[in-house]
Image: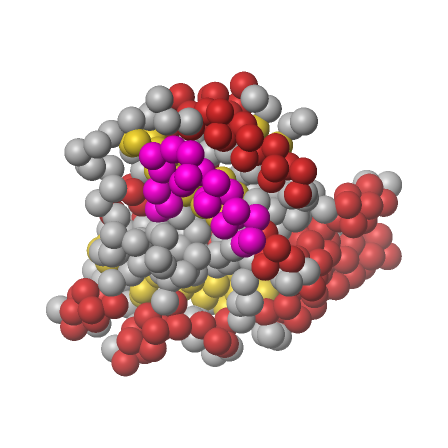
């Protein structure tokens, strides 16, 4: 039995999305063309925009489709940096995805606690030290630990200083209730492939009456807010996946139970601890620290058993560099060497997979 427990890296495409896209493969049309074929393509795009908007409680015109969250994050951060020739302050949490923290502009990083939660006191102190920041960017759920960040509180503090707020909600959307309004943020980034849609498509959500950051210039697509031929199949699939993910949010409770079961079993058989234990976490993610082991070796041993897990950050994988998230949490220089395994469950996870995974993990992690 092969087991895919790496849903934070990417998720299997949902059956309903596959069905829709298979049908669309037989059709033609550029959504910007004004003939019938083009209008039919544009119809798919607008339907998806309405679906996505409904799940987030925003108006359809607040949704801008793009190529994914890397683009969404780059769009917002770079736009505000360039607008002020790099002079405006941009504050981001120290555990952001590389597409926020390393997108080529100067940012100031907000520290997190050892449980991986943004430190609100230090954040407020940074806000008050110097000019009011132009932009604050904090993710809702960290991709490596699953730890939920106090974004609504952060937005409230930022607003006192007149700063704009951006939230990378990629790992939260479809895994917990998310609305732009409840978070109080101005910009929100989403990605289709984390919720059962296709890779290479995402959306930037914009609050009413705020400046629209633009990265790509050219054609007039997306109401002149994001140039480039619309990825009609990707967008249509995203709309369908969004609807299904949000309708099935209740399933996250089941995933959380399985995740807790896995953590309980592993803690009893090996010298393991759960990173971010004690903080609020999204239900599908577990980052396990294993004493005396190396992350890459652990990941490969799981792979040899047909189990896909991650060493933490699949986004920067290929390199065995230490994770900046663990570094920010002060976990990478522990006196006892430890390896990290990220387990992330999702919409295809079954009880049989959970039981089989526990057996395999017990074998791999057993105390020597
Ligand atoms: N932000 C977070 C938190 C992510 O987990 C990812 C994907 N690993 C991204 C941004 C980038 O998303 P995309 O793959 O759509 O570019």
Is residue 185 visible in the rendered structure shown here?
yes
Residue under the point 64% across and 57% down: 251
Magenta span contains residue 341: no
Is residue 165 visible in the rendered structure shown here?
no
- Which residue is at the front of the view, 202 or 277? 277
10 to the left or right of 84: right
Residue under the point 26% across and 48% down: 329
For residue 273, above or below residue 44: above
View extreme (left): residue: 129
- Which residue is at the front of the view, 180 or 246? 246
| Placement of the N terminus among the 4 image quadrants | top right
Residues rendered magenta in the picture = 256-275
218 to the left or right of 140: right
Rendered location of residue 38, percent (x, y): 79, 54
- Which residue is at the front of the view, 281 or 271? 271
Rendered location of residue 244, percent (x, y): 71, 58
* Tally of numbered tags: 0
View extreme (bottom): residue: 160
147 to the left or right of 174: left
Residue under the point 24% across and 37% down: 332
Q: Main secondary structure of the magenta part?
A: helix
Q: Quadrant of residue 140?
A: bottom left
Rendered location of residue 335, percent (x, y): 17, 33
- Which residue is at the front of the view, 364 or 41? 364
């Amino acid at each position: 039995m092969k087991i895919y427990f790496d849903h934070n890296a990417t998720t299997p495409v949902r059956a309903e999305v596959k069905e829709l896209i298979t049908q669309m493969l037989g059709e033609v049309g550029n959504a910007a063309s004004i003939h019938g074929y083009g209008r039919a393509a544009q119809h798919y795009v607008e339907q998806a925009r309405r679906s996505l908007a409904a799940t987030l409680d925003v108006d359809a015109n607040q949704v801008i489709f793009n190529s994914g969250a890397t683009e969404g994050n780059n769009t917002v951060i770079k736009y505000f940096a360039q607008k002020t020739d790099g002079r405006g302050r941009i504050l981001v949490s120290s555990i952001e995805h590389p597409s926020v923290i390393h997108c080529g502009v100067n940012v100031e990083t907000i520290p997190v606690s050892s449980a991986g939660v943004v430190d609100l006191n230090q954040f407020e102190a940074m806000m008050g030290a110097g000019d009011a920041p132009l932009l604050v960017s904090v993710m809702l759920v960290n991709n490596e630990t699953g730890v939920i960040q106090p974004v609504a509180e952060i937005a409230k503090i930022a607003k006192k200083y007149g700063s704009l707020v951006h939230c990378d909600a990629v790992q939260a959307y479809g895994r917990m209730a998310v609305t732009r309004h409840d978070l109080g943020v101005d910009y929100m980034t989403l990605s289709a492939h984390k919720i059962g849609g296709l890779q290479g498509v995402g959306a930037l959500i914009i609050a009413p009456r705020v400046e629209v950051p633009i990265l790509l210039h050219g054609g007039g697509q997306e109401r002149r807010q994001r140039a480039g031929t619309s990825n009609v199949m990707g967008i249509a699939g995203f709309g369908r996946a969004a609807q299904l993910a949000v309708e099935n949010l209740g399933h996250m409770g089941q995933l959380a139970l399985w995740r807790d079961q896995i953590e309980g079993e592993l803690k009893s058989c090996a010298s393991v601890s759960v990173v971010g234990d004690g903080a609020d976490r999204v239900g599908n993610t577990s980052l396990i620290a294993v004493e005396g082991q190396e992350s890459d070796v652990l990941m490969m041993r799981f792979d040899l058993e047909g189990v896909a897990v991650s060493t933490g950050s699949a986004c920067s994988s290929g390199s065995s560099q230490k994770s900046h998230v663990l570094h920010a949490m002060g976990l990478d220089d522990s006196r006892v060497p430890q390896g990290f395994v990220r387990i992330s469950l999702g919409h295809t996870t079954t009880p049989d997979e959970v039981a089989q995974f526990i057996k395999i993990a017990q074998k791999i992690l057993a105390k020597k």
